Amino acid sequence: MTAKPTGPGRGPGATGKGTERRVLLLDVAERILTESGHGALTMRAVATAAEVRLGHLQHYFPTRADLVAAVLRRCLDASLERLAPLLTGSGPGGRTAPDVLVRRLLAEQDDPLVVRLYAEVWALAARDEAVATVVRDFYDGYRSHVADYVGSRQPGLPEDVRRVRADVFVMLVEGAALFRSGIAGHRRESTDTELVTRAVALLEGPPG
């Protein structure tokens, strides 16, 4: 997953004096989620760590579900903001070359915080439909950008094939985090080389 802990005061909606308290609470909740896991992310734990009354926290986030959804939405929105320039060519240097793009995505998985957040997000999504909705919305946007990228590399490819390739690309790259992180396997350079080759083929391989 390309979701990365946003850090203090970063991420969408993190500017403006009126959002400072909300941002602080989200920063604290995100830190608890990343460092201690979703089981430790309770309303009381966040209020205590933020040194505010529980009622103050509930003014911004009435329920734990509201808080968790807000944390994840901020992280995932920030990830999509980082991804979009690579896939759309809106960043410096235009559209990123396929092999560079894949290696950039894999490089984010080298951050232990990213992998921990990845695991916690999926654990939450499996149990909470509201969280699952946030995660699905993120991946819908991610896949849409990838499908457009595939179309830019292979203009003659039918739209339904572009979308299938985008789906498989996201499955391949995101699922790799489990194995490359040591959770389900161990990273090897030879495996990474093959992974990049397969992922690049989905982006610019011959129609078929």
Image (cartoon, rainbow, N blue to C red):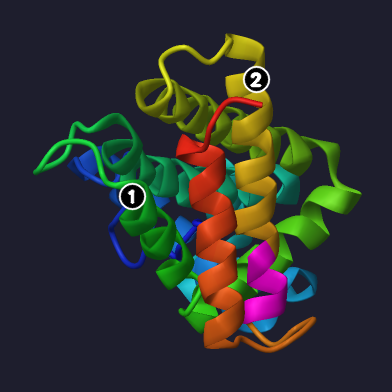
Q: Position of residue 5 (x, y in %)?
A: 45, 65
Residue appearing at x 19%, y 43% in the figure: 17
Amino acid type, callout 1? Gly
Element under disc 1: loop
The residue that appears at 85% across and 45% down in the rendered structure is: 128
Residue 166, percent across and down? 59, 33
Q: Quadrant of residue 207?
A: top right
The correct choice, above or below, for 87 with respect to 58 in the image is above
Taking 61 as reference, is 19 left or right? left
Q: Is residue 32 visible?
A: no
Residue 14, placed above or below residue 153: below
Between 81 and 198, the one nearer to me in the picture? 198
Tell me the SS state at disc 2: helix
Tell me if residue 195 comes above or below residue 165 in the rendering.
below
Residue type marked 2: Val
Task: Please identify the quadrant where the C terminus is shown.
Answer: top right
* Number of marks drawn: 2
Which image quadrant: the N terminus?
A: bottom right
Q: Which residues are magenta?
A: 176-180
| Crowdedness near tag 1: few (<14), some (14–19) or many (≥20) residues, C-alpha within 10 Å | some
Residue 119's place in the image compared with 149, above or below, is: below
To which residue does mark 1 refer?
11
Q: Which mark is residue 161?
A: 2
- For the residues labelled 2 and 1, the Cα–Cα distance comes to 33 Å
